[in-house]
């Protein structure tokens, strides 16, 4: 169940009335970014926590780092055995998110681990310039 399934139609109608770019400022409020991310900056390192509940197969999660961009793609699949949905607050389903990093990072020194629903990425500042988009291998710690 996608709580935002009718949001695009509603947004299109409002864009026609207010103009195309009016709602861009409110997009994160109307539809929170998925997955949720905490990013911590140190002098030469970035620590990124990504909220990914219910991931059983880490091969279905793609993490790409290209210079100063972090790209996350995959599926949050929360299984439940029947019953009527009373609350559906944990956003699930397919996601794709790009995050601009505060500085370029090294593609050869990245650690990715997954434990208890959190993907933890440790990224190191790039001193020399080089770009290449690399898929990361994620270690399952459970």
Image (cartoon, grey):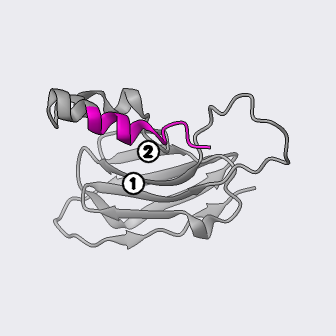
**How far from the left and from the top, in percent, is residue 15?**
21, 34
Location of residue 85 with respect to 96 vertically, above or below: above
Sequence-wise, which precedes: disc 2 or disc 1? Answer: 2
Determine the secondary structure under disc 2. strand
Few, some or many C-alpha atoms within 10 Å of disc 1 (few <14, some 14-19, many ≥20)? many
**How far from the left and from the top, in percent, is residue 140?**
67, 61
Q: In front here: 78 or 85?
A: 85
Q: Can residue 41 be seen in this view?
A: no
Residue occupying image coordinates x 80% and y 36%? 84
- Which image quarter holds the C terminus? bottom right
- Relative side of 130 to 10, left or right: left
Q: In front here: 86 or 32?
A: 86
Residue occupying image coordinates x 66% and y 54%? 77
Q: How far apart are marks 2 and 1 (CA)?
A: 6 Å
Q: In front here: 71 or 43?
A: 71
Determine the secondary structure under disc 1. strand
Q: Where does label 2 land, which residue?
A: 47
Task: Tell me where residue 47 sits by quadrant.
Answer: top left
Residue occupying image coordinates x 57% and y 52%? 93
**How far from the left and from the top, in percent, is residue 132?**
27, 73
Labels 2 & 1 near each other (Cβ < 8 A): yes
> Magenta segment: does it hold 3?
yes
- Relative side of 83 to 105, left or right: right
- Which image quarter holds the N terminus? top right
Q: Residue 123 carries which label?
A: 1
Q: Which mark is residue 60?
A: none
Location of residue 1 with respect to 55 vertically, above or below: above
Task: Tell me where residue 43 sits by quadrant.
Answer: top left
Which residues are drawn in magenta?
1-13
> Magenta segment: does it hold 42?
no
């Amino acid at each position: 169940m996608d709580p935002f399934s009718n949001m695009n139609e509603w947004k299109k109608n409002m864009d026609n009335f207010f103009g195309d770019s009016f709602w861009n400022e409110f997009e994160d409020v109307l539809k929170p970014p998925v997955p949720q991310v905490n990013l911590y900056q140190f002098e030469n390192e970035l620590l990124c926590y990504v909220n990914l509940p219910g991931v059983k197969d880490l091969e279905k999660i793609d993490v790409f780092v290209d210079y100063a961009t972090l790209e996350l793609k995959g599926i949050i699949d929360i299984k439940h055995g029947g019953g009527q949905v009373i609350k559906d607050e944990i956003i699930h389903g397919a996601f794709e998110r790009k995050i601009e990093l505060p500085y370029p990072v090294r593609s050869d020194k990245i650690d990715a681990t997954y434990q208890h629903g959190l993907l933890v990425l440790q990224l190191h500042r790039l001193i020399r310039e080089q770009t290449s988009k690399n898929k990361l291998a994620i270690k399952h710690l459970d």
